[in-house]
């Protein structure tokens, strides 16, 4: 139940964060204004960040605990181990979750605290006095290694969501022979739509479809 509830909270955040980031396709004013609106929240923004961080940590810790309990329930391995219904994503939820956590840590250092690219400090505010998040994202993703790491992290996130976004409903009691296959399919479609949405940004930047608003 704890894994399911924390998972729902994080899925809602992933959707909201994507909708905010996709504003880069509309133009600098949109995403810079969106970013400034978040900063205007002041202490509330940090309270939300701390709440989300606590949710991630609880989600990971309880998931690891469940995995350890499952292993201790059968210390002896199967002589003939064949998977019937378990997918690759469901069998590696702990691994993908931990790697995604490392990806989140880098993402925060990269764009939230702006500690990984010295060019970010050279960016001037836009005409409205807002920090130029638009140009920051463009310069950040122009690095092939950074974009490649993001795509890898997002792939693992999609893998994690492809199972988690449907299994949390089952954890909350929505179990039905007819409904479960539909939930599983819906979870996979949702996960790869999230992947496509997030990766569209670095791909568009690398293709030169989005250019910085100011030159350094």
Image: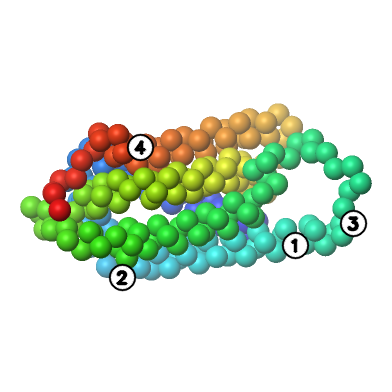
The reply to whether dot 1 and dot 2 touch (C-beta < 8 Å) is no
The reply to whether dot 1 and dot 3 touch (C-beta < 8 Å) is no
First along the sequence among labels 4 and 1:
1
- Give me the C-alpha separation between circle 4 and circle 3: 46 Å
Residue drawn 89% across the image and 42% down it:
80
Residue drawn 23% across the image and 59% down it:
120
Q: Are there few (<14), some (14-19), or many (20+) residues within 10 Å of tag 2?
A: few
**Secondary-structure class at tag 1:** helix
The reply to whether dot 2 and dot 3 touch (C-beta < 8 Å) is no
Mark nearer the viewer, 2 or 3: 3
Residue 68's disc is 1
Render colour scheme: rainbow
Mark nearer the viewer, 4 or 3: 4
Residue receiving disc 3: 76
Mark nearer the viewer, 2 or 4: 4
The picture places residue 200, in percent across and down from the top left corner, at 37, 36
The reply to whether dot 4 and dot 3 touch (C-beta < 8 Å) is no
The picture places residue 174, in percent across and down from the top left corner, at 67, 42
Residue receiving disc 4: 203
Residue 15 in sight in this render: no
- Give me the C-alpha separation between circle 1 and circle 3: 14 Å
The extreme left residue here reads: 127
Please state, as top left, top right, bottom left or bottom right, where the N terminus lies in the image.
Answer: bottom right
The picture places residue 55, in percent across and down from the top left corner, at 52, 62
The picture places residue 204, in percent across and down from the top left corner, at 31, 36
Residue drawn 15% across the image and 46% down it:
213
- Give me the C-alpha separation between circle 2 and circle 3: 51 Å
Residue drawn 35% across the image and 42% down it:
202
Residue receiving disc 2: 43
Nearest to the observer: residue 178 or residue 51: 51
Nearest to the observer: residue 190 or residue 124: 124
């Amino acid at each position: 139940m704890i894994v399911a509830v924390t998972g729902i909270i994080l899925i809602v955040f992933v959707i909201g964060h994507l909708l905010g980031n996709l504003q880069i396709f509309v133009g600098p004013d949109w995403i810079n204004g969106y970013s400034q609106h978040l900063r205007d929240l002041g202490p509330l923004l940090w309270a939300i960040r701390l709440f989300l961080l606590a949710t991630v940590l609880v989600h990971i810790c309880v998931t690891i605990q469940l995995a350890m309990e499952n292993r201790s329930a059968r210390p002896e391995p199967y002589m003939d181990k064949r998977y019937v219904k378990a997918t690759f994503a469901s069998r590696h939820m702990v691994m993908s979750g931990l790697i995604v956590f490392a990806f989140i840590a880098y993402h925060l250092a990269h764009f939230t605290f702006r500690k990984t690219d010295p060019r970010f400090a050279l960016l001037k505010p836009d005409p409205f006095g807002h920090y130029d998040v638009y140009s920051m994202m463009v310069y950040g993703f122009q690095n092939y290694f950074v974009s490649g790491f993001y795509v890898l992290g997002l792939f693992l996130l999609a893998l994690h969501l492809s199972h988690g976004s449907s299994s949390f409903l089952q954890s909350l009691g929505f179990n039905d022979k007819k409904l479960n296959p539909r939930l599983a399919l819906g979870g996979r479609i949702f996960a790869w739509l999230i992947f496509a949405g997030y990766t569209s940004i670095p791909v568009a930047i690398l293709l030169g479809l989005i250019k910085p608003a100011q030159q350094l």
